[in-house]
Image (spheres, rainbow, N blue to C red):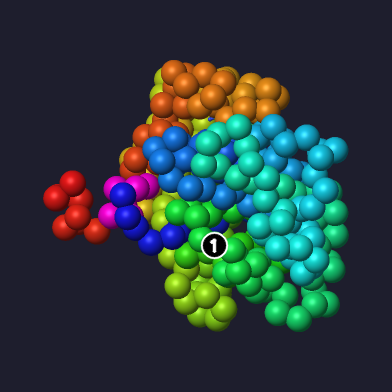
Amino acid sequence: MTHKPTCIAIANQKGGVGKTTTAINLATALAAVGHSVVLIDLDPQGNASTGLGIDRRTRETSVYDVLLGDATLAEAMVATRVPGLSVVPSTVDLSGAEVELVGVEQRLHRLKTAIDAMPAPDFTLIDCPPSLGMLTLNALVAANSLLVPLQCEFFALEGLSQLLGTVELVRSGPNPKLTVLGVVLTMVDRRNRLSDAVSKDVRAVMGTQVFETTIPRNVRLSEAPSHGLPALLYDMKCSGSVAYMALARELLARQTPPATRRAA
Ligand code: ADP
Ligand code: MG
């Protein structure tokens, strides 16, 4: 299982679309099949950290210290209950970083510099905040690919062009290597006709960039974080866990060049 290290920003400036749920469970699924994974929690709300069972009171060093150059990622990183998965936690300090970073040198490259200095795991996942500010830009400059969770609802596509426009700006400037890995439809309700219509619409617009795997609406996915567990540890058989395992497999297949895929 050899492939180049991959850094994936999970972003969408809309809140509540499933970014953090995707970050936690995709990271867990990739670790479950034997990859080393680091999840960087870049949202001041710290939901990815909490959802992985990292107690707020024990977060001494956070991604905030890393961005301001006061700590390395290795120093801020903590192990999780998932073997192979570490998290770089966030604290509320991070909400100040949007403003504080404006005045510092190399402000768009702070995260990239920190990532380049750490021994690369197989996958680095970055859970972005719901905005296209300094934090998300740092993620897009550091990443080599972007994964966009889209909630399967009427306004799903609204805002996507703004996000893709930001990607183009980043590609034409600080990070020409950034690619769109894909769009993943979340909170899909197969019995709901609207959900069905929206997913057809999104596929018509985004084509093969949309992952075939969709994430169903599943209450276990929303319960798991309150136990400080990824869904795969909370209930590995629930439809949400099964879907995130499938997403990880599809992502790995997309990464493997076709020739290797045939041989495998
Ligand atoms: P974001 O990080 O984009 O703000 P979250 O991942 O935190 O979004 O999800 C928003 C809310 O929806 C959370 O309460 C989460 O538990 C819930 N949620 C996310 N995905 C699903 C899903 N597939 N099924 C049910 N609830 C979900
Ligand atoms: Mg979130």
Residue behind mark 1: 119
Position above or below: 241 against 64: above
Residue 114 figure quarter = bottom right
Q: In front: 197, or 81? A: 81
- Number of marks present in the image shown: 1
Q: Residue at x 68, y 28 (%)?
A: 228
Q: In front: 165, or 22? A: 22
Q: Is residue 244 left or right of residue 56?
A: left
- Is residue 252 shown in magenta? yes
Tell me where residue 113 appears, x and y as whole percent. 63, 72
Mark 1, other Cα within 10 Å: few <14 / some 14–19 / many ≥20: few
Q: Residue at x 16, y 58 (%)?
A: 259
| Type of the residue with mark 1 | Pro
Magenta residues, as a range?
A: 251-256
Q: Can see residue 252?
A: yes
Q: Secondary structure at mark 1?
A: loop
Q: Residue at x 63, y 52 (%)?
A: 40
Q: Is residue 117 left or right of residue 94?
A: left
Tell me where residue 217 appears, x and y as whole percent. 51, 26
Q: Residue at x 24, y 58 (%)?
A: 257
Tell me where residue 121 appears, x and y as whole percent. 50, 55
Tell me where residue 179 appears, x and y as whole percent. 43, 65
- Identify the main secondary structure in magenta: helix
Residue furthest to the left in view is: 263
Position above or below: 70 against 103: above
- Is residue 71 shown in magenta? no
Q: Can see residue 180?
A: no
- Label 1 within 8 A of ligand 2 by Cβ: no
Q: Is residue 263 left or right of residue 91?
A: left
Position above or below: 47 against 262: above
